[in-house]
Amino acid sequence: MSIKLYNTMKREKEKLEPRVPGRISMYVCGPTTYNFIHLGNARPLVFFDTVRRYLEYRGFDVTYVQNFTDVDDKIINRAREEGMDVRALAELYIDEYFRDAASLGVRKADFHPRVSEHIEDIIKVISVLIEKGFAYTSCGDVYFDIRSFKSYGKLSGRTLDEMRAGARVQIDPRKKHPLDFVLWKASKEGEPRWDSPWGYGRPGWHIECSTMSIKYLGPNFDIHGGGMDLIFPHHENEIAQAEAFLGGTFARYWMHNGFITVNEEKMSKSLGNFFLVRDILRRYPPDLVRYYLLSTHYRSPLDFNDKKLKDSSKGLERLKKSYRLLQKTRERLKSNKGPYRNGQGLSEKLLNCVERTKKKFEEAMDDDFNTALAISSLFDFCRESNAEINRSEGFLSCEDIPALKEAEKLFKVIGEDVLGILKTEDAQGVIIEGEIAETTNVETLIQLAVEVREIFRKEKRYGSADRLRNLLKKYGVVLQDTPQGTRWESKTCIDTENFMEELISYFQKARRSREISETIWEKFNSAVKKMGNDLEENAVEQRES
RNA sequence: GGUGCGGUGGCGAAGUGGCUAACGCCGCGGUCUGCAAAACCGCUAUGCGUCGGUUCAAAUCCGACCCGCACCUCCA
């Protein structure tokens, strides 16, 4: 099986044939660091990170480069507004970038080159372009001479004539052709600047990507990616510069992700629907955002709004629950020597299913990284796995542990390692089960409450049992009664203080009305004591006051 | 005006010539349960923007048209 990907240059899917067998070199255009990253930055980030992970899963040795454009008009303007030093501002947002990226489960690239650290290289490239007659100087600037590069327009599929027809391009007397673009910009007063053969100035927008990608990956590297809006002019210009410089092919495959809209509208500052990743992560768990981004094929447009995000959370939950069910079942079986499977054959069925899923997953990803279809293979697996485990409940033994482990490994490899949707670095707000962040003490209390409720149920005191269940539910602890006992899981972080208070008052009342025995009360009391609360003392104080 | 992308059930979203049009959410019915929850099973598009055409066979190819979006200027 080979991997096929849609190459914007050819406008069709092609077989991926790397420059060097077994190795992939890829470059993805990174952000201009003048603000926190927004949702539009997040899509290529997450998608190409997934491409990288999948290629690694497929055994390729991947070299991944993503740049930071830290010299740019937008940064200079922003720094001026904020009264900040330009370098410091860029530095700040590079740090913040890494924070957001990590939240979304995006791994660091092998190289994160910055424009400011490659001025020498850029100057060299520009000098060569001038020497070869592809660029000219004018009023202290250096421009790329678009007409000297005959295949200009080959990526975006436009000809110079076509572009001229609808030209909204301002005529600039310094340029020989309206579409000629700047390679080196003469600096104005107070702007960051570097010395060059053409005077003090700074690089133009496109030249850094050509220069740095070639520097780190060499000519004719494998994959160049970015958002669709970069096709023209950014990537078109990159190609022109790079190929004029190299005299050969710049990059082999061009991949572009579709745009994100918000409430069916293009995200833009003027419409006031500009979403920063930071803000979204305050309201939604990062793995959900990643899951949402990957649940649509990367070349399709993706609309983002609260309802859609909420709707998709149930699906992700389902996958996680299924994953957890496997883990729990396996843990339970550790000490279980029997009964024998009695011909139920969970292992065999589960292993078959693992194989089928793996195949479906790989076929989906091999076909132009169809993450939406790949995720559906996990859902198929999840259904079958849940059904198998439920069906053979009670017939399982430790003999089934290897098969369960295989199934877990499937979730681990596909869900965590490749798609990155079942676990992220920064897990704030993620559903936690059987453990509450920070205080395992709260867990003890929950456990105790669950046990008490079990007693109620055994004694058929359902009113009491339900009251306790509702109390827990109020604090996000959801119970599930199974033949093997009661399972519980807790969403987000519990409001510990109020929870304890209410639980204590519940137990006190239950004691007074003799709903619970002294033994249970003692147990509860000692648990609470461990958390630094002495109920007897409190009780005494209350009586005294 | 030019270039490109898209229109699939209540919502989201796969599928680019041929099995009953994946998968998720929602809804309904059922199994399980003391009741729940979770899970599982079943149901929910004679139809894939519209109209024609090609073909034994089309959501899928061709043509025309309608609608939405993006790019052509900084933007992932």
Image: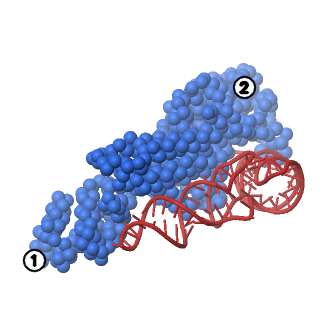
Chain colours: A blue, B red
Q: Residue at x 64, y 40 (%)?
A: A368
Residue A262 spot, x, y in % from top left: 61, 58
Residue farthest to the front, as pictured:
A342
Q: Secondary structure at mark 2?
A: helix
Where's the N terminus of chain A, which quadrant?
Answer: top right
Few, some or many residues within 10 Å of mark 1 (<14, 14–19, 20+): few
The residue identified by callout 1 is: A544
Q: Residue at x 50, y 49 (%)?
A: A381
Residue A133 spot, x, y in % from top left: 76, 23
Residue A244's disc number? 2
The answer, for residue A44, to whether it is visible in the render is no
Spatial CA distance of label 1 from label 2 is 90 Å
User: Is A461 left, or right, of A234 in this rendering?
Assistant: left
Q: What's the amino acid at mark 2? A: Ala
Q: Residue at x 60, y 51 (%)?
A: A296
Q: What's the amino acid at mark 1? A: Glu
